Amino acid sequence: MAGGQWPAVLVISPLVGAALCLIVGRWAPRAVGYFALGVFTLVSVAAGFITYTVSAVGSFSYHMGGWQPPWGIELRFDEFSVSIAVICLVGWLALMFSLHYVNHAVPEPRIPYYYALFLLCLGGMNGFAVTGDVFNMFVFLEILSLSGYALVAITGERIAELAAFKYLVMGAVSSLTILFGIGFLYALTGSLNMTDIAQRLSSVEPFPTGVAVAALTLGFCVKAALFPLHVWLPDAHAIAPSPVSAVLSGLVVKIGVLGMLRMYQVLYSARTFDLGALNTALMWLGAISIVMGAFFAMVQEDIKMMLAYSTISNIGYIFMGLGLASTFGIIGATVHIFNHAIIKATLFLGAGALIYQTGYRDLRDLRGIAKAMPVTSACIAVGAVSIVGIPPTAGFLCKWYIALGAIEAGRIFFAITLLFGALLIFVYYIRMLNAFYFTPATHPHLLQVGEVPMTMLIPIVILAVLCLVMGIFGRIPLSFIEPAVIEMLAPVGG
Amino acid sequence: MRRAFVIALLVLASVPLLYGVGQLPPIGSTDNPTYTHVVPRYIQQAEEEAGAENIVTAIILNYRGYDTNGEVTVIFTALVAVLGVLMITRSDSGPSVPISPVPVSPVTRFIVRTLSPFILMFSVYMVLYGHSSPGGGFQGGTIVGALLIVLSLVTESADVQRLLPPAVKVWLQPAAVLAFGVIGIAGLLLVGSYLAFPVEGDLVFLRVPWLTVIEVGIGVGGAVIVASIFWAMEGSA
Amino acid sequence: MEGLWNNIDYAASVVLFLIGLYAVIAKGNLVKKLMGLNVMETAVFAFVMATGIVTGGDAPILGAGAHEPFANPLPQALILTGIVVALSTTALALSLIIRIYERHGTIESEDLWGVE
Amino acid sequence: MSRAFDLVLYALLISCALMVIRTKDLLAAAIIFTTYSLIMCLVWQLRGSPDVALTEAAVGAGVTSVLFLITISRTTRRER
């Protein structure tokens, strides 16, 4: 079997590791962070081997318990599953960042729980990304959502529980909507395996399938915080400790997009459905998301709040790319999932470093900080330039591709919206950089703070370098994902 | 006004939903895809392939054991989350106010004490015979958990918690996840993939012990987790 | 309409789902919202269980006295998992409510969104 | 099981759900919710799913309700 036993290592070790975290935490509270990092290193090695196998020999699947699908659960490793690579990368760096950061952000007795939840969240995402079974997808969605809600509340700050509760209610309703859609699909096809559903969908009633698709879309759009369903996001992402924000903003919202991609995979290969209405709706909602997210971000003074709204804007890009349903659009959207994860993690970890050293999170208080923390500020600047989409950074290529997709689909209006959105994003990131670099300090004593400890600085630097590298070598992920997208769109002649 | 709007929206949403469910395959028929596609193999071969007379148990522990592995992780996540959220921190003014004690009538206390051994026996039976009768690890475990909760309510909560010292509790809470991990890895080494049970050959005698280990793990883990969540929420843990 | 009449189990779960959703959206009390969420959860479970109904179906447990046709065991297995997931969500939400009450002294959302 | 009995059970379920929403007293609402879960449990038992019925009785009606009750006792009983 291609890939050997690495798939099992990938999905199981974070779950068992999280269980052991509490035991380790009881006897050696200081070691929990290193233990979690060790466990996740193992997971990352597994993800590395799997990514290599996929790129070398192509897709493969792993049968849990040795049962053939559709009777057993299949883990599917294809080009979209390779998002485990970015999950592990960002997750590992965020864990490393946490080693020092938690002492400042999380009350001490809660630290073992913090690491256990962090591992569960990352493990849940890995499980979600690789599963080929719709119900199993729901189970892992719940693992990662539950740990996400708790991680938002774990700081015990003033409104942390409120933000977490809002997130929980919306998240739980969307999970139930997804389960409802899964129930519909099961009633129609009698199967839970995605490949199998795709084959059997071609011979069922179209209307109930439409209802199922609508339910799944609604659920995943809440998870991904598309515009009218985004209300849970800003508070939750701004209140959470910074490494958690990096993971929530960079990865957890992408889980919704990944779910959409899986659904599209099934629907496109079932061939029988006209997805025109859905695509148009996603395109418009994406466009509105871009503009509204950017607009709200412009008026924020809190740096993390600004980054949170910026996520909504970027999710808009991804959904617009999906909705365009043209090859370039979907390639751009897929690659933007990866790039935005890296960029947003840079920015949130950078913001976390600033907050750690200064204790301030308001842009007006952080003026002139570039003199005191040059490396961190430079990394944030790289992230900002990258997210605006200035060449030669990571953000440029995907936005370029999405714009090309819009033109390819004959929708010039959306290409213009995209440019307009990029302009708005430019405005608010310029405002931030202006405050850091070119404004005299509000609090002169901050000029003496110095850089953060190495375990926090290194992840930020690695991510910032990746932002640049992904811009220059951006064609590698593009060419990696391109065959998969062309294959996915082939049945509808995209 | 807002309520009327919500109601109107939901009524509007109900139309396509009801129309959609009206077009689903008719309930109850044995010709439905749900009954003709995947399930026949479970019904016909569960006993010989998976080693459990209760087909539902065969599915949750064997065919779709990985789902159940996820499920026990979800409940464990809930425990970690509840403890993480409720753990008392320095910023608080002190331990939270305990619930105002409600006097328990001696009759209730007597009944609970008399019945508890029988309830315990019932749940142990349910855990051990889950593969051949209704019930199973989680149901039995929940009943033990509920028993611990009831005992905490009618007697002193601290007395009941003394049954489970923290050093033991921390090992028992993840029992279900760990049991799955152990059996899963055993399957990986002996049969060839994670959570695989021997289907035929020399090792087939291992099936029932493995099922039992998982069931007991789920039972113990479930009971301790349910009780721990209760104690944490009650404010005494 | 005939299809709907035969699929009355699905229809009932859709109605329950929407009732629960109404409570989640329109109720101000956090505990009430959560009860609505639980009603929704149970409704979805009822929906999935209804996919497995077989007229005259016996419990899918082999052994003495069992007779064909058996009820579909797969939805049952799924819902066993689902119920546990629902319990987990409820437990976390309730502990958040306890913390919110300790901190703000109220669990009415109208009062709470003002605190921000 | 006859269709009429089905309808009665579903009517009961829907009225229970509505009462959970309408009742201002949270304690009463929690108890009505327990009833709702138990009726659901009865429905499933009648459909040949003793496993799920047992779980729903233990978890849905039992533990969930206890958790609701403990929350209500630590917060407040009245809904505005």
Image (tube, rainbow, N blue to C red):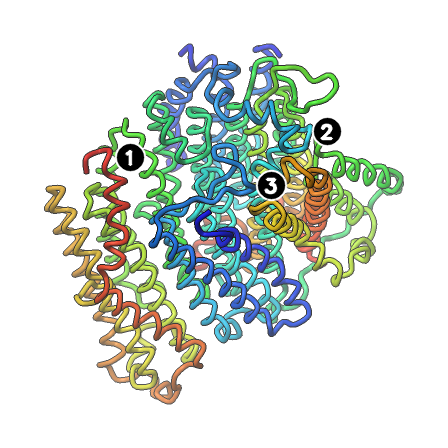
Most extreme residue toward the front is B202
Distance Cα–Cα, label 1 vs label 3: 33 Å
Q: Nearest the camera: A3 or A458?
A: A3
Q: In the rendering, at what x and y percent does residue B225 appear?
A: 68, 50
Q: Secondary structure at mark 2?
A: loop
Quadrant where the C terminus of chain B is found in the figure = bottom right
Q: Chain of mark 2?
A: B
- Report whether residue D14 is seen: no
Marking on residue A268: 1
Q: Which residue is mark 3?
A: C84
Q: Nearest the camera: A374 or B130?
A: B130
Q: In the rendering, at what x and y percent does residue A175 appear?
A: 46, 41
Q: Which residue is mark 2?
A: B133
Contact check, label 1 and label 3, Cβ < 8 Å: no
Q: Nearest the camera: A204 or B203?
A: B203
Q: Secondary structure at mark 3?
A: helix
